[in-house]
Image (cartoon, rainbow, N blue to C red):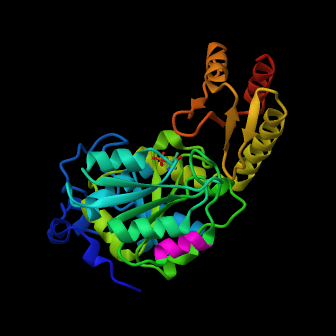
Amino acid sequence: MADIDYLVRENVKRLKPYSCARDEFSGKAAAFLDANENPYGSLNRYPDPLQKELKNRIAEIKGTDPGNIFLGNGSDEVIDLCYRTFCNPGSDKALVLVPTYGMYEVAAGVNDAEVVKVPLDDAFMIDTAKTLEAANLHSPKLIFICSPNNPTGNTMQREAVEAVIARPGSIVVVDEAYIDFSPHPSLMPLLKKYENLVIMQTFSKAYGLAGARVGMAFASESIINYFNKLKYPYNISVINQEAVLKKLSSGKPVNREAGLIVRERMRLAEHIASLAITEHVFHSDSNFILVRFSDPGKVFGFLLDRGIVTRNRSSVVKGCIRITTGTRKENDMLLKTLNEIK
Ligand SMILES: *Cc1c(COP(=O)(O)O)cnc(C)c1O
């Protein structure tokens, strides 16, 4: 496996991270008098900066090593950390496959990295030749691949993704936020083969914990160590770590709820496809559908007037609205309202 150190910013390599009071101690203390906390109360202690208990649990579930896991304040923190670790502001680039998740570009703006956009093909799949050509031309430090993709919903071709990862010179971030809804397997097994691969997943979607803000990154230990060095020391609160641990020990497998959502998504897709106002319902491996309407502005406005909020993506994908699967009742209300549009 190729070493990725040469892709890391020099200041990051040199950086000496903040050392937390608790870093210097592991074991059972008689009294914690090291961190200037208030000794009274229930949230009076700082959280574990490396979230060991939670990572051990995630490692069990995902079949990986805790040393290959990073937890962020949502995936958004991971995206930002990718830029901060690898992209020198003002000179380095990132490559994104459009249309895709907007945060890759926002985080590039924050970090003053230039974004190279390569369009997906007509089926929203990776155009391998174009993507590799652009990568060779621009030498991006980061390449973001969202699969299943937001807002299109489809899974990218495995061979194409692997071809991009196998090309040396870039860190490839595969965003699997919707993987628990997908019939296709995660690319996690590729981590054993590629040191330049980062896989992101999240507790915000299938796990139903968007409010807790906990995102996961899986990568080689060297990348994880750089992320740990750069992150705010206590990036995940005690409350949020406990919320995830509680969910993971609830005995409710994530697949069951995800399965229910997927069945509802299929019901929505089938019904919406049959409407006269609909031009196309795109295939989805996620918990939402992208729908092309003949008059998306009218549909969006009509739904909004009835209090139903969808995401108008027609500026990004011609004619399209992205609709998230709700509860059965919410979906019934949506379908009933769509039926009323002439
Ligand atoms: C929702 C979503 C995420 C999750 O972000 P969090 O910060 O973990 O809530 C990540 N990537 C994509 C593509 C998403 O749509």
Q: Is residue 28 visible?
A: no
Q: Position of residue 141 (x, y in %)?
A: 32, 66
Residue lying at 63% horizontally and 53% vertically, measured from the top left = 122
- Whether residue 160 appears in magenta in the rendering, the answer is yes
- Please say if 332 is above or below 18: above
* Quadrant in which the C terminus is drawn: top right
Q: Nearer the viewer, residue 129 or 219?
A: 129
Q: In the image, is residue 7 above or below residue 181?
A: below
Q: Quadrant of residue 198?
A: bottom left
Q: Residue at x 54, y 50 (%)?
A: 203
Most distant residue in the bottom direction: 1
Q: Which residues are magenta?
A: 159-165
Depth check: give the residue in front, 5 or 152: 152
Q: Where residue 237 sits: x, y (%)?
A: 37, 47
Q: Is residue 198 above or below residue 300?
A: below
Residue 185 is a magenta residue: no
Residue sitting at x 60%, y 74%: 159
Query: Is residue 90 toward the left or the right of residue 55 in the image?
Result: left
Residue 103 lies left or right of residue 182; in this view the side is: left
Among the 4 quarters of the image, the one containing residue 86? bottom left
- What main secondary structure does the magenta stretch of the protein show? helix
Q: Toward the viewer: 49 or 87? A: 87
Q: Can see residue 337?
A: yes
